[in-house]
Image: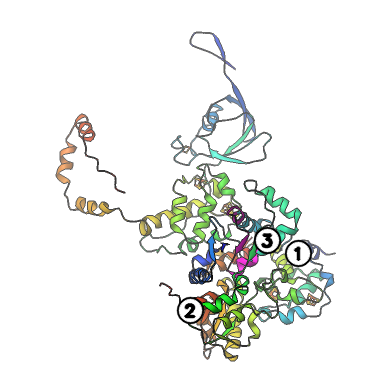
Amino acid sequence: MNWLLSKVEELSGENLYACYQCGKCSAGCPMVEEMDLLPNQVILLVKLGDESVVEAKSPWVCAQCYQCGVRCPREVDIAKIMEAIRLIKLRKNIDHIKLENVEKNLPQIAIVSATRKYTG
Amino acid sequence: MEMGYYPGCTLKTNAKVFEDSLLKAFEKIGIKLKELNKWYCCGTVYSLATDNLMYRLAAIRNLIRAKEDGHEKLVAPCSICYNTLKQANLMAKSDEEAMSKINAFMDEEPDYDGSVSVIHPLEVIEAKLQEIKAAVKKPLGKKYAAYYGCLLLRPKEIAIDEHENPSIMERLIEALGGSVVNFPLKNECCGSYNVASNKEAVIDANYRIITNARRNGADAIVTSCPLCHFNLKEMQKEVKKVHPEFAGLPVYYFSELMVEAFGIEMEG
Amino acid sequence: MARKSKKGEKQEMEMVRIYIMGKEYKVPAGLTIMKAMEYAGYRYIRGAGCRAGFCGACATVYRKEGDYKLHADLACQTTVEDGMWLVQLPFTPANKAIYDMDKIEADDKTLVNFYPEIARCVSCNTCTKACPQELDVMDYIQASLRGDIAKAAELSFDCIQCGLCAMRCPAEIAHYHVAQLARRLYGKYIAPKARHLEERVKEIEEGKFDEEMKKMMKMSVTQLRKLYNARDIEPEED
Ligand code: SF4
Ligand code: SF4
Ligand code: SF4
Ligand code: SF4
Ligand code: FES
């Protein structure tokens, strides 16, 4: 097993081999238009050990809406996989955004969420 | 009847109108929401990593405060807070190993056992629809699109209603004398925290969702989440820059409709 | 160790073992950490000020034998104990936001706009446990996050800016700077204005007391003391 896959499985608790690439997750994903990789492609690339997924747009645009997970026929929770990929970067103490640059006067809820998803 | 109430940061700021209207509306149907004596930011989005217990401390600490204040039920109106507190509470009930670590870490707190139940005001409302009907003084009359977003419905374990086709909010609107429109995007994500990092995603989502509601004949959108509210309402200005033909819609919290129909005067 | 008392007979002085940056020293029991370090031969060039628990310059952290807790305290206020492992943390690097008090407003976003990192607080309570002033540090950060400036100001009133909270915080918050801004905003924009203060300042500016001041400047210390003791004290207002 490549290190990326084992790390993602460890952090997400999900079995990526359960995925049979039906694409249902991507079909229902509300953020898919903003993504460079479809959610099912993200899964495939992790299985192939392609580390470029960490810097791809998709994990960072994923809004943790859980739509993919509730629709997946194989009960793969893709939101958890996206989180695991984000954490691979964030846990190296590399932030994805600079908090100082976040627009001022957003509701607290947006700022707190951003700190949780984009800073380590 | 008295119930514990967890406001969350945003109901004290951007969504003050949500708090004010909800407290008044609930008082009208005989429920006093009593704010916790002490509470902390729940951490918003629930942490999904298997080992990230740190991000769940705040939620558990809030549940301990609720228990300390003697509440069996804790009402969390903000959809994100609801989701986070509820998922943390499920963990407290089912994941012994995680809880033993959390309890050991928070050595200044009593152990928590998952015994507080986290509920959303819409769940309370569902059992009170008769009282609500009886309290209506000025029936609403307009057509509304009930927007649930994600976090009241997913993951399934925390859903307040049928997750693909919920209807609590519609039933409330009808009880208040309004009518509801068919709204396929009622549980589609508003883009959430992308507003802090990738606004385009929110602008696109806003355009899709509001246009869908308009095409189905809605006069307004109704929601229960301060972040959905912000993304759907405040971001309309930005949508207009990209789509000049975009007409927009007013966005309300469900509790605002309640006070309106109950004929309660709000200050300010 | 023994020393001679005045009468010439030997008296045992109780000594304790402490470890300063890992090196063992025997120092008299009952000394503060600050005095014990000086006893051991260290000289404070920085990291000491008032020596009375007010200035916050002498932050120190230590562990005790058989206790996993990392304690944080003021060196001038804490008595050494046998088996203490300690080090001084005289300074905590932290950025202070730049603002002009006359130009900023006190609203529910001011604190989080200047210090967005407060949104990273995970409510771990480590800051509260570290605070030598026993403040509810986590609570004032939480109040700051939700825009409750008055509460943040009130809860942080006794902060001496020692920096220990900031050194321990996993969210990398510089608590005391946030709190200072909260108190400044509170003082300038929120607290009720003292009724007589503005009038009195105006009187001073108008020169109403110039004559009296001149007179006093010529007085001797004894005269001044007499005058001071005989002053009128206004009853406190509610
Ligand atoms: S829906 Fe499930 S099985 Fe289908 S591609 Fe997505 S993750 Fe794989
Ligand atoms: S959780 Fe993320 S990947 Fe899944 S549907 Fe939502 S936005 Fe798409
Ligand atoms: S709040 Fe922080 S800086 Fe202030 S006294 Fe306490 S530990 Fe020191
Ligand atoms: S130490 Fe930092 S993260 Fe922990 S409660 Fe204090 S401010 Fe919050
Ligand atoms: S030297 Fe001032 S507080 Fe210790």
Q: Tell me, yes or no, if residue B23 can be seen here.
A: yes
Which span of residues is magenta-colored?
B65-85
- The residue indicated by pointer 3 is B88
Residue B43, x across and y down, in percent: 61, 62
Please tell me how crowded label 2 is: few (under 14), some (14-19), or many (20+) other residues with Cα within 10 Å: some
Which mark is drawn over residue B211? none
Nearer to me, B143 or C21:
B143
Please tell me how crowded label 3 is: few (under 14), some (14-19), or many (20+) other residues with Cα within 10 Å: many
Q: Residue at x 53, y 71 (%)?
A: B29
Please, which chain is the residue tagged with disc 2 on? B
Q: Residue at x 57, y 44 (%)?
A: C130
Ligand 1 within 8 Å, label 1 CB = no
Residue B128, x across and y down, in percent: 59, 73
Q: Mark 2 against mark 3, which lies toward the viewer? A: 2
Nearer to me, C152 or C40:
C152
Between the residue at mark 1 and the residue at mark 3, the CA separation in whole angstroms equals: 16 Å
- The residue indicated by pointer 1 is A12
Residue B217, x across and y down, in percent: 57, 91
Residue A99 shown left or right of residue B95 in the figure: left
Between the residue at mark 2 and the residue at mark 3, the CA separation in whole angstroms equals: 34 Å
Amino acid carrying mark 3 in the image: Ala
Q: Are marks 2 and 3 in contact (CB under 8 Å)?
A: no
Nearer to me, B146 or A29:
B146
Amino acid carrying mark 1 in the image: Ser
